[in-house]
Amino acid sequence: MENYHAGSLVHESVVLVITSRPTYGNGEPPENGKSFAASLLHLKRKNNLVNGKVTDSGLSLATCIKRSIFPEQKISLATNVDKPRNSLAMATGPLGNIRFAVFSLGSNAYPHFAIFGKYIDKIFKELGAEMLVEYCTGDALYGQEQSFRTWSEEVYRAAFDAFCLENVDIKEAIGPRNMGDHSWSLDKVRIVLVDNGKEQDLSHVLSEIHGKKVEPFILSERTQLQAQDSKW
């Protein structure tokens, strides 16, 4: 992302953004996304000034990201653009020529889950870009690969429809992306018969599995490191 100049966006027709970020910290973008996010924020502030809207020029990038995402921290900025438009003719703003989609990776164990991707999705809409598909997240703790496969297939179909690519075989187009067979069958797994009549010592079994000695201990203390409202 650091190799892409945000000024080139005005010349694009389709933009697909995939973000990945450890979701601890204060909502800062990843290192390779800081310059891109800062450029988008500058473009937004410039557009707000042109249209006579309140700007947030005195705030840091991380603060703008959090205030943009969390309703209780919002300041009065651009108009509400939560609902996608149905036509490019309705698009206004410096990125009104763009159809876009955002997929954001993260872990729902952290309070700022996928916040950078949410911010990119929101600021693209505020700058006039039109969504191809709804913003989607991939949770590292809950099937992110399947989420990405579903999202990417929806993006292909939406792009074909948006640009009227009627002569393209969509199955052939998305086929290479789904070359891996994720179905379950007996010939893909190793099955070992065990003696269910005799319960084995857990430490002994784990030692054999991991190739090292495993010993049980008594837990003396437990400390909650995640947020209190975390479901993990």
Image: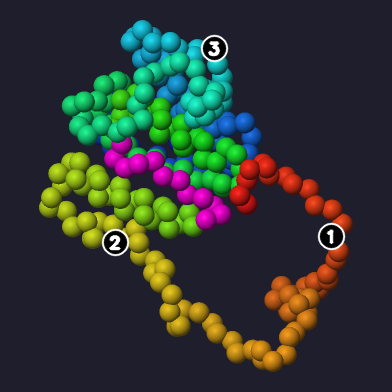
Callout 3, which amino acid? Gly
State the extent of the magenta-drawn residues as a range. Answer: 131-142
**169 up-or-down from 189: above or below:** above
Find disc 1 in the rendering and name its residue.
Answer: 219
Tag 2, which secondary structure? loop
Work out whether residue 23 can be spotted. yes
Q: Position of residue 223 (x, y in %)?
A: 78, 48
Q: Is residue 29 magenta?
A: no
Tag 1, which secondary structure? loop
**Image side of residue 149 versus residue 97, left or right:** right
Q: Position of residue 128 (x, y in %)?
A: 30, 25
Callout 1, which amino acid? Leu
Judge by depth and name the residue closer to the eye, 231 or 176.
Answer: 231
**Image side of residue 16 versus residue 73, left or right:** left
In whole angstroms, how far apart are the C-alphas of marks 2 and 1? 50 Å
Nearer the observer: mark 3 or 1; the answer is 1
